[in-house]
Amino acid sequence: MTTDTGTTSGLLFEALEADALTSTEQLRELYPQPHENAVRKEIDHLTDETRALIGCASLVFIGSTDAEGRADVTPRGGPPGFVSVLDDRTLAIPDATGNKRLDTLQNVVETGQVGLLFVVPGRTSTLRVNGRAFVSARPELLGRLTAVGKPPVSAIVVRIEAAYPHCPKSLMRGNAWKPENWVPADVQPSSARVTLAQLDLPGLTVEQVEELERESLRTRYE
């Protein structure tokens, strides 16, 4: 029996993949058709209500893919309404200081598509938005996107093709906003310990990683 975790998990994936569903017809055999309202409420523009929801959202998750189809999801946060509604079909998401990997920005440049999930902390209402996208460094646009006190280096501009208020069941099932149901802090590994294990650098300590994290947070708007 192999002890190589990567090899073992690879074999497990291949075993499960062998009888995976391979068509939408097979998938549909497992589920009833959606209610007509679940289809009808997807539209290609914002209403006054979804504009207001975006104005309350301080967190948005951005899904993207690169030219090879590899997927990525990353969070973006800021003051409520940090994502600007330019008109009823156009959004602008300011970039913020991060790890400089530029995964999302590069994916948008390569494929011109994104999927967004807007979240309002403490509320179960969410909004899904899918559409065409590009990265802009136009000064007159960036000058309007000063939610953190200064213009960003760039922004993702999204042309809405589908806007869909999402059912609150997932946040309710996950008890996302109920502290009494949260996992105790001492049960989960700290961010620094997770990073230390990922880096796997000889001599690096958890205390050093914690200091790097504190410094990164101190300069998060720089």
Image: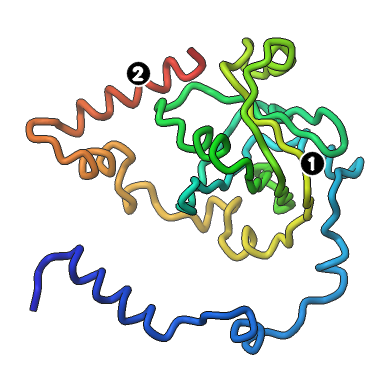
Sequence-wise, which precedes: disc 1 or disc 2? 1
**Disc 1 to disc 2: CB gap under 8 Å:** no
When asked about the image quadrant of residue 47, the answer is top right
Front one among 129 and 122 = 129
When the figure is inspected, residue 42 is found, relative to residue 220, above or below; the finding is below
When the figure is inspected, residue 163 is found, relative to residue 219, above or below; the finding is below
Residue beneath disc 1? 53
Instruction: Determine whether, in the image, residue 170 is placed left or right of residue 65.
Output: right
When asked about the image quadrant of residue 118, the answer is top right
When the figure is inspected, residue 139 is found, relative to residue 25, above or below; the finding is above
From the top left corner, tell me how far across and down residue 163 is, in percent.
79, 51
Instruction: Determine whether, in the image, residue 67 is placed left or right of residue 133.
Output: left
From the top left corner, tell me how far across and down residue 105 is, in percent.
53, 33
Q: Residue at x 82, y 28 (%)?
A: 86
Q: Residue at x 71, y 51 (%)?
A: 128
Kind of element beneath mark 1: helix
Residue beneath disc 2? 215
